[in-house]
Structure formats: structure tokens, C-alpha cells
């Protein structure tokens, strides 16, 4: 049974704060690690797909790193904005399916 | 809109009734997935199709659940004799075969069984 864990469960920050979340996953039989952002009433939106140990990816103010040897990934948001409020999910991928963590719920207030 | 679409978006049903949901994937995506998300949990894998072939089913998919993708395009997920524990968000995703398993999700169907 694959166990993907995310922390913290929820986070409340003020506009302008930088923040980061953690995703831990099994380090054996690694295929890919995905990050999604899921806003209420919308579809989960793919942020990053990471496959190589040491990968670092960036999209605007959001970036992610990957360590497959120790089984963790970090997602960073620089200068949080209210529109960043969402649930951030990570998922461990095999060739056929995704196994998700429970997500980190981020709320950014003015 | 060329994304993944799901219908209906919301469904309220009484316990014991049958329900059917539909998913229209991104055209030309030959892989289609169903997931279920309950409160406080991440989405959990239910089943996966490559074209019309159902290649994998989770043990979460009890015999009351059946999924089809008859022509390799849209898919339906049917739940028979619904129970209150079936209340959840049902998500559909699709991917092209060579994407490295990058999956594109629809907005989900929220099922409430009363």
C-alpha cells in the first residue's frame, strides 16, 4: 500500500507571506511526482510533474523541488496572494494511476 | 472549452437508487481514469481505461459500481443501490498515452446520498 503524506494539513497566511508545504512518498519504485492545485468548484489544475532526483521546477511565484532518494518534495509559494487560496495536492505516480496525499489547504488573507 | 467535462455536477439521490455519471475526456486522450474523494481525504483511484479496455480496478470498486467506455471516448460510472457511504466527489481524468501519466481532471460530480 502506497502512503503519500502531506503537511501541514492546513495553513493560514497573510498576503505577501512566503510559504512551503511538504509531500513525502515511498522512495522505491519511483515513477513521477505530481503537484496539483484545486480551487473550490473547479477542476484540479496540474502544476508540476517531476521525475528526476534533484528536479526543481518553477511557475511564476510557485516552485517545487524533488528528492527521490529520501522520498520528499517541497512546494514553495513566494509572496502569497489571495488567489493562491486552494488545496494543494501531491500525488505519487505509477505508470497507470496516481496515489494522492490528503492535501494542504491554504488560505491567504489580506 | 476543450477540457475534461463531467455531468451532472451535482446529484442528490435517495439511498437504494441507482445513479450514473458521465465523463467526456479531452479528445484524442486514450486513457481515462475515475477517482473518488471523500471529506478530508485526497482523491482515491477507482479504475482506468485505455481506449475501451478497462485495465485496472481498485478494490474500492465494489460490485455495485460499474464503469464503461464503450467506444473509447466518453465513459460512464454507475452506482447501483446507493448507500450513504457512497456520498463523495467523483472525479474523472484523462491523459494521452505518452504523457508520463500527466492527468487532466474534470470538475467532478458531487454525489449526496440521503
Image (cartoon, grey):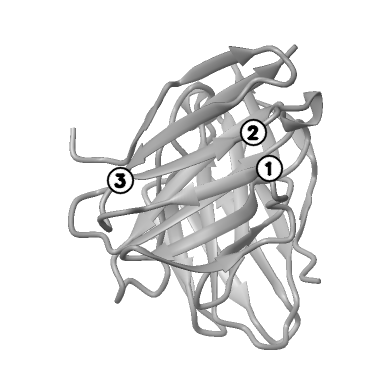
Closest to the observer: A72 or A92?
Answer: A92
Q: SS of the residue at dot 3?
A: loop
- Rounded to the nearest angstrom, the CA distance separating label 3 from label 1 is 20 Å
Mark number displayed over residue B80: 2
Dots 1 and 2: beta carbons under 8 Å? yes
Upstream in the sequence, badge 2 or badge 3? 3
Name the residue beneath numbered marker 3. B74
* Residue at image point 72% right, 57% down: A22
Is B71 situated left or right of A48 in this image?
left
Count residues near mark 3 (Cα–Cα under 10 Å), then give few for <14, some for 14-19, many for 20+.
many
Upstream in the sequence, badge 1 or badge 2? 1
Closest to the observer: A105 or B104?
Answer: B104
Q: SS of the residue at dot 1?
A: loop
* Residue at image point 56% right, 47% down: B66
* Closer to viewer: mark 3 or mark 1: 1
Upstream in the sequence, badge 3 or badge 1? 1
Mark number displayed over residue B64: 1
Is B31 situated left or right of A88 in this image?
left
Q: Where A1 sits versus B92, above or below? A: below
Read off the chain for label 2.
B
Closest to the observer: A69 or B54?
Answer: B54
Quadrant where the N terminus of chain B lies? Answer: top left
- Is residue A36 visible from the viewing direction of this image? yes
Amino acid at each position: 500500500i502506497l502512503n503519500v503524506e502531506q503537511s501541514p494539513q492546513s495553513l493560514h497566511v497573510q498576503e505577501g507571506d512566503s510559504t512551503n508545504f511538504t509531500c513525502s512518498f515511498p522512495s522505491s519504485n519511483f515513477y513521477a511526482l505530481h503537484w496539483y492545485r484545486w480551487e473550490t468548484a473547479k477542476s484540479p489544475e496540474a502544476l508540476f510533474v517531476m521525475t528526476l532526483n534533484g528536479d526543481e521546477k518553477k511557475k511564476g511565484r510557485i516552485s517545487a523541488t524533488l528528492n527521490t532518494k529520501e522520498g520528499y518534495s517541497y512546494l514553495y509559494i513566494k509572496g502569497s496572494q489571495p488567489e493562491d487560496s486552494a488545496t494543494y495536492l501531491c500525488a505519487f505516480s505509477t505508470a497507470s494511476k496516481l496515489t494522492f496525499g490528503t492535501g494542504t489547504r491554504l488560505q491567504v488573507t489580506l | 472549452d476543450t477540457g475534461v467535462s463531467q455531468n451532472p455536477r451535482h446529484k442528490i439521490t435517495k439511498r437504494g437508487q441507482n445513479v450514473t455519471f458521465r465523463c467526456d475526456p479531452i479528445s484524442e486522450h486514450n486513457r481515462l481514469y475515475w477517482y473518488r474523494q471523500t471529506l478530508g481525504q485526497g482523491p482515491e483511484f477507482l479504475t482506468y481505461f485505455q481506449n475501451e479496455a478497462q485495465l485496472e480496478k481498485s478494490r474500492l470498486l465494489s460490485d455495485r459500481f460499474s464503469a464503461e467506455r464503450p467506444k473509447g471516448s466518453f465513459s460512464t460510472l454507475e452506482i447501483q443501490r446507493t448507500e450513504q457511504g457512497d456520498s463523495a466527489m467523483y472525479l474523472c481524468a484523462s491523459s494521452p498515452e505518452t504523457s508520463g501519466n500527466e492527468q487532466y481532471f474534470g470538475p467532478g460530480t458531487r454525489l449526496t446520498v440521503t
